[in-house]
Image (spheres, grey):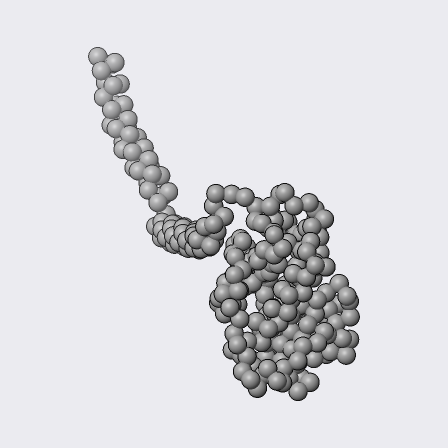
Amino acid sequence: MSQTLSLHFQQEVQLRFLCPGDLGEVKRLCAEWFPIDYPDSWYDDITSSSRFFSLAATYHSRIIGLIVAEIKPKVKLNKEDSDILATCFPPTVQVAYILSLGVVEEFRRNGIASLLLDSLLSHLTTKEFYNCKAVYLHVLESNGDALRFYERRNFRPHSFLPYYYFIQGKSRHGYSYVLYTNGGQPPWSFTYPFNKVIVFILHNYHYACVNISNFILKSLTNLTDYISHCGSVLAKLQPCAFPRQVYQALRSLMQKFVVVSKPATQEQHSR
């Protein structure tokens, strides 16, 4: 259920589509809200192209929130998202991808994000967009506020995306979430009703595997260090010299035995 806006905001907040003149402000806001660096061409597109649903919430003419979505045919889905719809839907069926949804920090917890999302969903459920069967998005796994927001709005976790993001030189995990509209259905399976649980298990299983791998790697490293240390100690003791010393001692002993025995043998032959 959407948050109820206060009377003050109901009177003052207005919605309008982005225009090219908003480019600088939108770029600044996205830099504050999101850890991803978008190219300049992206800002040009979302503020000028009709291909995007780019809606801003304004307060006294100031942009305090925005939502950007792209409506595209199923056939243009990326590989990791290609199975969000049941196979019975043709490639020409449409889906909506939420690229961005953000609100200025001081205006959060006032229903602005819900207002923007509701506007998009109302737009997509009109007769004109009846062919749009799903709304989906990607979200960083560490963004707990966003995860809870979309789950409250009946979005379902579809898949866990390991190493999906690359932020500040580090790989980060993410999730995909889906809301089905206009009769859209997920791919049929016995497990889909339990997808949220499965995603949670896979997520923690992944971390368990990572932790086990790190433990094994650390153990092997410690073992290698120990062997290396032992090797350096043995090298100082020169263990290879020990067999040589034994051999030389035995050889010297044998030589003495032969020297002692030889005169005796010669004496026996002379008799």
Q: Position of residue 155 (x, y in %)?
A: 54, 60
Query: What residue sits 33% from the left and 35% below the top?
Result: 247
From the viewer's side, name the closer residue of 143 and 222: 143
Q: Is residue 221 above or below residue 247?
A: below
Q: Is 49 displayed left or right of 260 in the figure?
A: right
Which quadrant, please, contains the C terminus? Answer: top left
- Pick out the residue farthest to the front: 127
Kindly indicate the quadrant of the structure image that contains residue 50: bottom right
Examine the rendering and report whether any part of residue 17 can be seen: yes
Q: Position of residue 33 (x, y in %)?
A: 59, 74
Q: On the rendered structure, is 24 left or right of 203?
A: right
Q: Nearer the viewer, residue 234 or 118?
A: 118
Can residue 108 be seen at all in this image of the molecule?
Answer: no
Q: Residue 58 is drawn in which quadrant?
A: bottom right
**Nearest to the observer: residue 179 or residue 214:** 179
Q: Is residue 121 above or below residue 190?
A: below
Who's the residue at 48% across and 43% down the image? Answer: 190
* Number of numbered tags placed on the structure image: 0
What residue is shown at x 70% (from left), y 76% (from top)? 16
Residue at 33%, 42% (x, y): give it.
Answer: 242
**Position of residue 1 measured from the top left corner of the image (x, y, whole percent):** 51, 68
Q: Quadrant of residue 88?
A: top right
- 163 versus 142 height, above or below: above
Counting from the top left corner in percent of width and height, residue 104 is at 59, 79
Residue 56 shown left or right of residue 241 in the figure: right
